[in-house]
Amino acid sequence: MFGLLLAIIYISFISLGLPDSLLGSAWPTMVTDLNTSISYAGLVSMIIALGTIVSSLLSDKITRKLGTGLVTAISVLTTAISLLGFSLSNSLLMICLLAIPYGLGAGAVDAALNNYVALHYASRHMSWLHCFWGLGATISPYIMGYAISSDMGWQSGYGIVSIIQFVLTACLFASLPLWKKKNTTNANDENYEAPIGLRDALKIKGVKQILIAFLCFCAFESTAGLWASSYLVEYRGVDVETAATFGSLFYMGITLGRFACGFFADKVGDKNLIRGGIVVMLFGIAMIILPVKSDIFSLVGLVVAGVGSAPVYPSIIHSTPTNFGKENSHAIVGIQMASAYTGSALMPTVFGLIADFINISLYPFFLAFFVIMLLIMTELVNKAVKKQSL
């Protein structure tokens, strides 16, 4: 039963990753079909992220009432329906409206699953599970690239992914008996612990810094993924179909990096994985910045940056119960998700404006700023936690 539940959780992480890279790989084509501006990709991404912020902040209360399994199943169903709507849309307004339920579904399942794994599984499982998120994020641009190159259109790409999500939803509902009953505790249960509020969470040393770190990481990851294809098309002159495929290389780097990290995560430790990952991220960005005509350095740089970012997100989440206490972990993970998606909501939109009014060539420099801030914030968290333990 334990192994079967773990398999279901792996499937759930695939479902989390599948939709995340679709918008970036489809947008160069959607811009023409929807007769809109390139910068509006940031608006759609912002709406999705705002939905995740709301559901992430409510995740602790919702999960305590419904349990991790049911929250996961309902959330994936919501995203599946939203993606089906995307596949039937022909206007920017409809895309924006459908982005609302998609965001609400994504935030709740993200916080619930990440906290569950942080509490019940070793660091290597967190890396491998997030590797499966990367697998989903890597597969979907290929699906979109195939749909576009086969003249089926970007709507068909969304439709194919929505069907996959519906199949995963059926698996999740069938798995509900496997989830532990202790995840459905409520106020009448003997072992119930009331969730801490935002104010109390912010009083814990290191929490403010980790929230900024999450914001910076997701600002980097979402901007890198969303604008990779557009950067390749507009600045490097790569054709649309090739750019959609190459845009997935960033997510492929994340996937391969997390798979590799799983083999030594327990020995190296969360703190060192975060530090090492950030250094590799900076190296990858430096490759993208190199002023050479060949596209190979930019493409390889995207992969290297993805590989570097691989251990950062899962390691920060996995360290949450250790750094801030198991009793506070679900609430703090939810707040972390909200902060992360704030970065996802705002920064791709900001860069969209930069691309429109200044130049899309600033893409790697924009990314570098957030990675440097990420390094500073995580080191401040380490100092705060160390001081608290003395």
Image: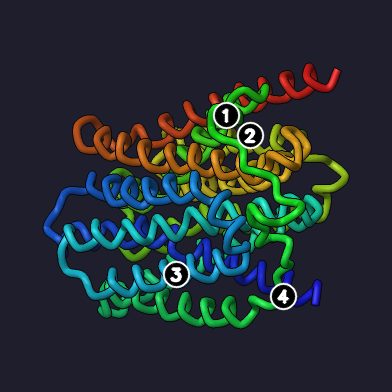
- Do tag 4 and tag 1 residues touch (Cβ < 8 Å)? no
Quadrant of the image containing the C terminus = top right
Give amino acid for label 1: Leu
Q: How many numbered discs sit on the rendered protein?
A: 4
Give me the C-alpha separation between circle 3 and circle 2: 27 Å
Residue 229 shows up from this direction: yes
- Horizontal and vertical percent for residue 226? 38, 50
Disc 4 designates what residue?
A: 178
Pick whichever, 210 or 69, lies toward us. Answer: 69
Instruction: Indicate which disc, 3 or 4, sits on the residue closer to the N terminus.
Output: 3
Q: In this view, does 161 lie above or below 310?
A: below
Instruction: Indicate which disc, 3 or 2, sits on the residue closer to the N terminus.
Output: 3
Q: What numbered label is drawn on residue 333?
A: none
- Horizontal and vertical percent for residue 245? 42, 63
Q: Is residue 77 above or below residue 26?
A: below
State which mark lies toward you, 3 or 4: 4
Provide the secondary structure element on which disc 4 rests: helix
- Do tag 2 and tag 1 residues touch (Cβ < 8 Å)? yes
Disc 1 designates what residue?
A: 374
- Horizontal and vertical percent for residue 173? 57, 78
Disc 2 designates what residue?
A: 278
Disc 3 designates what residue?
A: 142
Provide the secondary structure element on which disc 3 rests: helix
